[in-house]
Amino acid sequence: MSTHRRREIALNGICPYFTMFPLDFPCSILSRHASAGEWVLDPFCGRGTTNYASRILGLPSVGIDSSAVAVALSQAKLANTSPQLIVRAALCILDEIEVPRQLPAGEFWDWAFHKNVLFMICRLREGLLKNCHSDSRKALRAIIMGALHGPQPKSRPFYFSNQSPRTYAPKPRYAIGFWKSRGLIPQTVDVLKIIEERAQRYYSRESTVAVGKIIRGDSREKRVYCIPARIKWIITSPPYYGIRTYIPDQWLRSWFLGGQPNVDYSTEGQVSHSSPDDFASQLKKVWWNAGTVCEPNARLVVRFGAINDRKVDPLSILRQSLKDSGWKIITIKPAGSASKGRRQALHFSFPSKRALEEHDVWAIREG
C-alpha cells in the first residue's frame, strides 16, 4: 500500500487492538459487489473495520457490539469532524473540569503515568463521561483511548503512559515488575499536543462523509437491531472459538470509559466458549436476528477461524451455526492462515504452532 493511500485511510488505525481483520477484506467485497445506497451491517463490529470500509466507499452502515471499547472506537470511525473541532472539544472540557472528582490511586497508577499526565487524563475522562454526544467528542474519546498506553519512542512522545504495549493494556502486577526492574519512570508529556497531533493524523485527510450508527448491545438479542433501513450486506468476523480475553486485554480503555480502575476478568456479553455446540447455537441466534432486518436475497460474508489450543474444526462450527438460521451457504473460500495477515488467531496462539486455516463463508438470505 502506498504512503499516500495509508494517509488517506489513517482513521482506521485510530486505536488498534488484536481482534481485527484487514480493511482490504470488507473493502474488496463491497467495492466489487455493492451498489450505491445499500446498507451494510456488522453484528460483531469490534473496532469498526467494516463500518469504516463502508464509509470510504460511500455506503451507509450499522455496527453492533457488546463491548464499550469496541463501540467507542467504531463511533469514532463514523464521526464527521475536523482536527480543529476535536482540539476545541478538549479545551472546552478542560475549561469545565479543573479538578477531577476521581483519581485512581495505587502502585500501578504511580508507575504507569506521570502524576500531571494522569491528572489531565482524568479531567478529560470526567468531561467525556458527562457529555460525549457530538462527533468531535466521540473522536476525541477514541484518540485518547489510542494514546492511553503504548511504547515510549526515542523521538517525540505519542503515548501518555510508561513503556507499554499499544494494542492491549499491561496487567498491573507484571507491569510494575517490568518497569521497576528496568528503571522505567513515567515521563511527563504534553497531553494536548499529543491529542492535536493525533487529530491531524486521523482526521485531516478524511474527506468522506459517514452515514450510519453504532449500537452497543448483544447481537444475540433481537431487541438491539434498531436498524434505520433494510440491510443488503452483512460482513463480519465473530470471535474465533477459544478467544475470550477481549475484556481484560482492554481494561485501561474500559476504565477510561467509566469502568473500574482494575482488571475485569468477566465474560458478560460474550458468546459462550464452553463447547463447540454451545458456541454454534449462540452464533445461530445472531444470524437469525440479523436476517430479520435484511432485504430479500441479502448477502452474508463471514470470516472465521480458531486458535490452536482448541481441537476443533472452525469451519464445521460455522456450518452448524448457519444450518436452519435463515441463511444458505453459497460458497466457501480459503482465506489463508493468521500468519499471512493481522488476524484474530495470530495473536492468541502459541507462536511455535502452525496457524490454522481461516475461511470466508458466503451465504444468501432465504425466503
Image: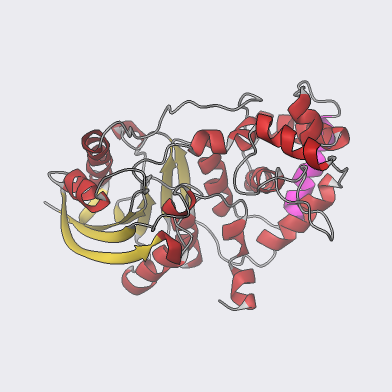
Give the vertical position of 146 relative to 297 (above or below). above
Q: Position of residue 341 (x, y in %)?
A: 46, 64
Among the 4 quarters of the image, the one containing residue 300: bottom left
Please indicate, yes or no, whether residue 184 appears anywhere in the rendered image: no
Q: Position of residue 357 (x, y in %)?
A: 32, 60
**Does the magenta stretch mainly form a helix, a strand or a loop?**
helix
Please indicate, yes or no, whether residue 108 appears anywhere in the rendered image: yes
87 sits left or right of 302 in the view: right
Magenta segment: 83-97
Residue at (62, 37) in percent of width and height: 253
- Please name whichever residue, 284 or 166, is drawn nearer the observer in this view of the structure: 166
Give the vertical position of 23 relative to 129 (above or below). below
Q: Position of residue 195 (x, y in %)?
A: 77, 50
Q: How is the image coloured?
A: secondary structure
Residue at (51, 42) in percent of width and height: 70
Does residue 89 belong to the magenta stretch?
A: yes
285 sits left or right of 144 in the view: left
Give the vertical position of 103 relative to 216 (above or below). above
Does residue 148 belong to the magenta stretch?
A: no
Among the 4 quarters of the image, the one containing residue 84: bottom right
Task: Tally the numbered discs.
Answer: 0
Q: Position of residue 310 (x, y in %)?
A: 32, 43
- State the quadrant of the N terminus: bottom right
Give the vertical position of 104 relative to 242 (above or below). above
